[in-house]
Image (cartoon, grey):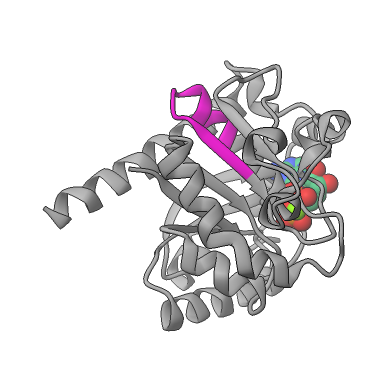
């Protein structure tokens, strides 16, 4: 039985695309058949970060509009055959298309194509297509940074999700700079955790290698023994443990 994970944020630019790509690549590397969909309507970027922009012919809107099939559209990057990437719509006005087609798309990916996980790189904020993405998802991972504005928006996002959707909530704190923490110039993970109502999956530091890898179109976790790859692996293990506990409780 597959699971749909929505990667979201209140504020824009917190690292959703970076996190979605590396988390999905790592899930696939751990043996789970994983689909990664860019649902940023019109403002897509996942194809560039994943280094597959030259191979993207069709996109998620084409599948929903039945211009292309899932098989025609999904790209298997050379670095991981277990990962399937569906590029985002090119039309800036594609919100309606996403809203109409997301449910059947994720159903097909799981029931017909046998995906274990579908990771959705979502647009920031609330409302619009976010509602349908949340309805179609089992879990939400909120990506936030240790800034007051990011925390406030993540807080609002959490409240919106709690009020409206029955999905499990996790969060990842991205872009942490320990030298600022040492000088008391940044919100501490402890303060952030006391404000957030979701479970923390992990912390990602600000790292020039992450920034460079996004520009180069290579997931940073491909450097398998790096501290960053190990960190992502830990977050995967934590996430898998949480969902196993949930499944057990259901029985
Ligand atoms: N931990 C990090 N260290 C360094 N740069 C980062 C980190 N996380 C994200 N970035 C950079 O920040 C920018 C925004 O990240 P991105 O994943 O595109 O955010 P979003 O998808 O939420 O808009 C990108 O230039 C990315 O390379
Ligand atoms: Mg993005």
Q: Residue at x 39, y 66 (%)?
A: 167
* The image quarter in which residue 238 lies: top left
Q: Quadrant of the N terminus?
A: top left
In this orientation, which residue lies closer to the viewer: 142 or 5? 5
* The image quarter in which residue 46 lies: top right
Q: Residue at x 85, y 34 (%)?
A: 53
Residue 237 % position (x, y): 38, 35
In this orientation, which residue lies closer to the viewer: 30 or 70? 70
Residue 215 % position (x, y): 87, 35
Residue 191 in view (yes/no): no
In this orientation, which residue lies closer to the viewer: 27 or 181? 27
Farthest-out residue, front: 66
Residue 164 % position (x, y): 45, 81
Q: Which residues are magenta?
A: 24-36
Say whether residue 30 is magenta: yes
Drawn side of residue 86 relative to residue 52, left or right: left
Q: Residue at x 59, y 17 (%)?
A: 224
Drawn side of residue 54 relative to residue 67, left or right: right
Farthest-out residue, left: 251
Residue 203 in view (yes/no): yes
Say whether residue 16 is magenta: no
């Amino acid at each position: 039985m597959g699971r749909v994970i929505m990667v979201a944020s209140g504020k824009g630019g917190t690292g959703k695309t970076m996190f979605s790509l590396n988390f999905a690549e790592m899930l696939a590397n751990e043996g789970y058949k994983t689909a990664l969909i860019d649902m940023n309507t019109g403002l897509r970027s996942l194809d560039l970060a994943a280094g597959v922009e030259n191979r993207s012919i069709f996109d998620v809107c084409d599948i929903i509009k039945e211009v292309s099939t899932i098989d025609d559209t999904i790209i298997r990057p050379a670095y991981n055959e277990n990962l399937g990437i569906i590029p985002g719509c090119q039309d800036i006005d594609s919100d309606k298309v996403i809203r109409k087609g997301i449910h059947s798309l994720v159903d097909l990916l799981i029931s017909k194509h046998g995906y274990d996980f579908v990771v959705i790189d979502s647009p920031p904020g609330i409302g619009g297509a976010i509602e349908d993405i949340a309805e179609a998802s089992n879990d939400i991972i909120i990506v936030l940074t240790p800034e007051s504005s990011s925390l406030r928006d993540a807080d609002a996002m959490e409240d919106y999700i709690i009020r409206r959707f029955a999905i499990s909530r996790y969060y990842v704190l991205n872009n942490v700079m320990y030298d600022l923490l040492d000088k008391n110039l940044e919100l501490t993970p402890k303060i952030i955790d006391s404000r957030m109502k979701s479970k923390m999956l992990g912390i990602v530091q600000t790292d020039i290698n992450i920034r460079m890898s996004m520009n180069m179109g290579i997931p940073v976790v491909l450097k398998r023994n790096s501290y960053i790859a190990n960190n992502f692996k830990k977050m995967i293990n934590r996430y898998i443990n949480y969902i196993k506990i949930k499944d057990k409780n259901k029985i």
